[in-house]
Amino acid sequence: MAAERIFDRAVSVRARGCGSEERRLNVRVNIELLSISNPVHKKDLAVRLTDDTDPFFLYNLVISEEDFQSLKSQQGLLVDFSAFPQKFIDLLQQCIQEQNKDVPRFLLQLVSSAPALDHTPVSLNVVETNPFKHLTHLSLKFLPGTDAEIKKFLANCLKCLKEDKMMLEEKLKKTEGDLTRQLSYTQQSLSEKSRELDKLKSEWTSYTTALSNKHSQELTSEKERALQAQTQCQQQHEQQKKELENLHQKSIQQLQNRLSELELINKDLTERRYKGDSTVRELKTKLSGLEDECQRAKQEVLSLRRENTTLDAECHEKEKLINQLQTRVAVLEQEIKDKDQLVTRTKEVLDATQEKKVILEENTEEKQRHIEKLETTIKSLSAELLKANEIIKKLQGDLKTLMSKLKLKNTVTIQQEKLLAEKEEKLQKEQRESQEMGQSLRMKEQEVCKLQEQLESTRQKLEESKQLLKTNENVITWLNRQLSEVQMAKKLDSPASAHTGGKAAVSPLGMPDRPPFHSSGISHPISPLYAFQNFLEPTHSKNGNSQYPISKAGTLTFFVQLNSQLSKLSRCSDAHTVPAAGHTANKENGDQLGLESKYFKKKDDSIPLRGLSQNTLNSEYLRPYLPAKAQPSPKAAGTPASAYFPG
């Protein structure tokens, strides 16, 4: 026998006995379909009434198909046995829906013939209430359960309770494991999110401090730049104004000097003209200066507006960041509210973050106030610009009045032009002369440009010659050494040289004095090369008798090197030939003729160097001491000393 449970719910029922009052009971209605296959396949409908509070309350009803036919004929039912259980369940559900109302439409009545429900048969009525009549849709008679049925029912209840207990225990274990896992996971997530909160707080504080520092630095730097730019513009404007005034005054003076040369009759008219021109020019300069100031002020206004836009964009970005952080904080608050013990700590942290947010909002309000101050300054600048425009308009009106006055003066001058026609011819002649002078000035300017180019080329060549002269330092030092050695030899041979004829007087240093050339007009001393040549002649003639003879190979190498250096200098300085007479005189007075001062310092063991003469520095003095291959060409022999030592 198989049982299929269709309905199992608690329903409020109005119980009424014979001669007793109605009372409400919560009765559990259990409907099952019993299918029996032995010996014939048939179905029965089993209905059971029980009370959860009273385990001995048990009423049973089993309806077979045959019993249903008699019930159908007795109560006038229009439903078959197959559809009867569903219709009965529908009536019970309507009763359940209406049971909480004060005046329910459908009722369940449990009527007993005895005064109390004490194991007596009971009828269950489904009643529909109307204002006119109570209609009973269905009435079923239930029999009380026997002791065996009650025991069986109680055993089934115990079995079901044990199964439910096992299921609940398993569910409890599963739920405990799940809850422990969820607790551990939530605790981990809480720790991670608390760390994230700390990180976010630290990042937010550092970010806000950095932003405030950046904004303060940028504001200070921009203020300093604006002040510097204003001061520079004012200084430039004042300098330009002064320069223009000076130039204007100079031009007025020149024009007045020219006009003073003209006749006395035109003086008044010309002075009036120049005065008018000067006033017009001053007004034009003032207008140009004011226009420049207006343009600069407009540019400053545009720059300030751009700065305002950038500041607004930064403020919007900050607000977006604040909103994002607020959303994050809200999500974290929702997650933290679900937890048990760590809620209080997280709330305190969130309160701290909210206080910091309030501080940040105050900072933003201060920045907005600063922006409003900047806007007020911009408005003041715009008002000043409007004032400047009004001043320009006034100046334009003054210009118009001056132009009208000038027109009147022009009418007067037109009348007097007949008298000035003759003088205009004279002026034209002077203008032609001035044009000719201007052309001559232009020619001279071109010549000056050419001369400047030549000067630059000569300077370059001079630099090259200086480099070559620096290379000659070694040669000069060697010459000084040779002269010192010769001097020492001369000092040793001084008793012998004192008996030689009076060709030349001997200097205190042992060198022969340079004789003056009165016939050639040269009164200055002769260069050291001439003295060295005069010195070499007696030493060369007395080479056999001297104790310290000079080697001819050394002198030849020296003169070959000297000749090669002089030829290089002559090639580099062909364009710089200067008269020698003036340079020799300057040489005696201390001029160095292109050589540096270190070449002319007096040493203790050397002969002081002096200027090289144009007439004495000639390769003819060197020819007896040079071999045939090393003798200079006739062109090199004729080059003066000024070519080798340019001034």
Image (spheres, rainbow, N blue to C red):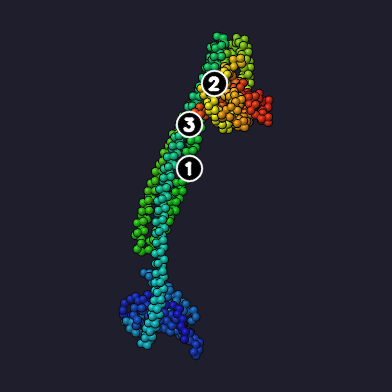
Q: Amino acid at mark 1?
A: Thr
Residue 206 sits above or below residue 591 on the image: below
Q: How many numbered markers are drawn?
A: 3
Q: Which of the labelled discs sits on residue 233, or is there none?
A: 3
Distance between the alpha carbons at the discs numbered 3 and 2: 84 Å
**Is disc 2 surrounded by few (<14), some (14 to 19) or many (20+) residues within 10 Å?**
few
Q: Which of the labelled discs sits on residue 309, or is there none?
A: 1
Distance between the alpha carbons at the discs numbered 2 and 1: 103 Å
- Frontmost of labels 1 and 3 is 3
Residue 128 sits above or below residue 469 on the image: below
- Frontmost of labels 3 and 2 is 2
Q: Amino acid at mark 3?
A: Cys
User: Farthest residue toward the bottom?
Assistant: 39
Closer-to-camera residue (331/603): 603
Closer-to-camera residue (100/378): 378
Position of residue 163 in the picture relative to residue 645 (left or right): left
Task: Classify mark 3: helix, strand or loop.
Answer: helix
Image point (48%, 43%), residue name = 310
Position of residue 223 in the picture relative to residue 438 (left or right): left
Q: Earlier in the sequence, mark 1 or mark 3?
A: 3
Closer-to-camera residue (456/388): 456
Q: Which residue is mark 2?
A: 498
Q: Position of residue 412 (x, y in %)?
A: 56, 13
The quarter in which the C terminus is drawn is top right
**Is disc 1 surrounded by few (<14), some (14 to 19) or many (20+) residues within 10 Å?**
few
